[in-house]
Amino acid sequence: MKDYCLDLHKLFNSMKRLSIKDIDEIKINNGIYIFFENGEKYHGYDRIVRVGTDTGQNNLKSRLIQHYLTKNKDRSIFRKNIGRAMLNRDGNPLLDYWNKDLTKRASKEKFRNEQYEEECKQLESTISDFLDKNMTFVVFPLETKEERLRLEEAIISSLFHCEDFKASDKWLGNFMPELRNNNVKKSGMWLSQGLKATPLTDEEFEKLKEICEAENEDSIDSMHKE
């Protein structure tokens, strides 16, 4: 099976780059997003650090908003992992509390601590600032949930199984604490799932390339109309 790691970086780096200020302008309702992080490179291209999608329908923008703007680590594993790495790097004892999922009422009643909550709010603001200053992304459309989930895991697996796909020594994810089923440090990406999936097939890559090139053409047409 062909190694598509470099091809994926060439393809996604050729697409219109977006940031937090562009979310409202995204016209795609269902699709996949690819994140890049400042300072991370792969063969001269910006290195992919996260691949994600919306699991419901018409939720792409709302998912991006949860990552970038919604200051709630229990609604975005992306944000939660960034916070974990920051806290572990700094030796901050808040880490144990940050790891708790307080979405359920029972958990809130059992674990909620006002002092820790205030510290979490401050960290949430730090994470939002980090995302704003360091993360950009591209998006491409895929209408069905089945297609999205399959291509998401196939892209992730193709990247993970590439021998020279590695994070830089300075990457924040290197500070991820050892947690069960958390593979951020191992994968070199802000994600843990999809690593063992079947990588992209030739047919899937050609389909992906066609979709992304069509999205590029649409972006260029929109720029000319403005």
Image (cartoon, rainbow, N blue to C red):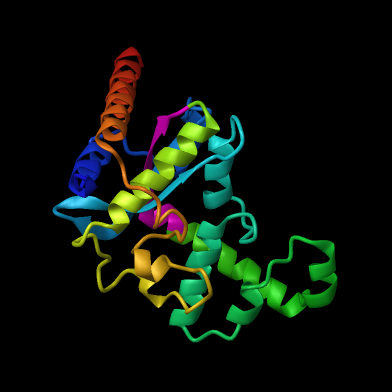
Depth check: give the residue in front, 194 or 87: 194
Q: Residue at 40% of width from left, 77% of height from top? A: 175
Q: Is residue 91 above or below residue 166?
A: below
Q: Residue at 27% of width from left, 25% of height from top? A: 213
Please state, as top left, top right, bottom left or bottom right, where the C terminus lies in the image.
top left
Q: In this view, does 189 lie to the left or right of 169?
A: right
Q: Residue at 43% of width from left, 53% of height from top? A: 194
Depth check: give the residue in front, 174 or 142: 142
Q: In this view, does 75 lie to the left or right of 179?
A: right
Please tell me whether residue 126 belongs to the stretch shown in magenta: no
Snapshot quadrant of residue 185: bottom left
Please state, as top left, top right, bottom left or bottom right, where the N terminus lies in the image.
top left
Q: Residue at 44% of width from left, 61% of height from top? A: 130
Percent x, y of residue 221: 31, 16
Percent x, y of residue 92: 54, 84
Percent x, y of residue 143: 50, 26
Q: Give the range drawn in magenta.
A: 131-142
Residue 184 in view here = yes
Depth check: give the residue in front, 150 or 32: 150
Please tell me whether residue 132 belongs to the stretch shown in magenta: yes
Residue 33 in view here = no
Q: In this view, does 117 lie above or below 195?
A: below
